[in-house]
Image (tube, rainbow, N blue to C red):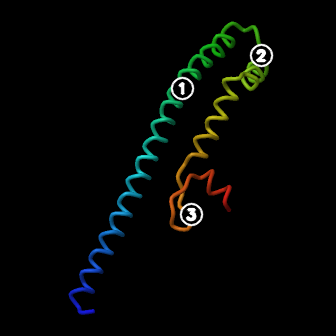
């Protein structure tokens, strides 16, 4: 095998490795963008629900029908408050982290380790 053939093989091999790396990077970027968009939609939805909940709570405080402790307990028992906690947990679980140099979702990283 002469030097020209060896250089040609190395160039082809390098090109293949680069294309594999580039396609994997594009796939990861697209997945991150999809996750980000889904989380932003969920956050916007939750923000609107939280605003309506805050309005209800402020109306309760203004009306004087309930004490602050009763308002806090009502807020903690509210399904919207529980939903908010669940979706915050979802958002944290969907973050991308590096495990052994590979990008994975945080939830998968905890499952495999």
Q: How many marks?
A: 3
Q: Which mark is residue 21?
A: none
User: Is 11 in front, or is 41?
Assistant: 11
The N terminus sits in image quarter: bottom left
Q: Say few, some or many: other residues with alpha carbon within 10 Å of mark 2 (under 14 / 14 to 19 / 20 or more).
A: few
Mark closest to the chain's N terminus, 2 or 3: 2
- The residue at 24%/93% (across/down) is 2
Q: In the image, residue 61 lies at what x, y percent?
A: 68, 13
| N-term-proximal mark, 1 vs 3 | 1
SS of the residue under disc 1: helix
| Residue at numbered disc 1 | 47
Q: Residues within 10 Å of mark 3 (few under 14, many from 20)?
A: some
Name the residue located 62 percent from the left edge and 35 percent from the top edge.
87
- Which one is in front, 14 or 77? 14
User: CA–CA distance between discs 2 and 3?
Assistant: 49 Å
Q: Is residue 21 left or right of residue 94?
A: left
Considering the numbered disc 3 on the image, is that residue within a helix, a strand or a loop?
strand
The percent position of residue 101, horizontal first and vertical second, equals 51, 67
Residue at the image position 28 percent from the left and 74 percent from the top: 12
- Dots 1 and 3: beta carbons under 8 Å? no
Residue in the picture at 46% in, 46% down: 31
Q: Find the distance from the CA under tag 1 to the CA under tag 3.
A: 32 Å
- Give x and y (percent) for residue 102: 51, 63
Instruction: Check disc 2 and report the residue beneath it.
Output: 67
List the residue tagged with mark 3: 99
Element under disc 2: loop
């Amino acid at each position: 095998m002469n030097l020209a053939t060896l250089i040609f093989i190395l160039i082809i091999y390098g090109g293949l490795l680069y294309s594999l790396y580039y396609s994997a990077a594009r796939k990861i970027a697209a997945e991150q963008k999809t996750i980000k968009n889904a989380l932003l939609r969920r956050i916007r939805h939750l923000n609107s629900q939280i605003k309506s909940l805050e309005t209800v709570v402020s109306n309760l405080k203004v009306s004087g029908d309930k004490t602050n402790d009763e308002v806090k307990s009502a807020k903690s028992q509210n399904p919207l408050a529980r939903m908010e906690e669940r979706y915050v947990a979802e958002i944290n679980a969907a973050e991308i982290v590096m495990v052994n140099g590979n990008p994975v979702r945080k939830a998968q990283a905890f499952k495999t380790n």
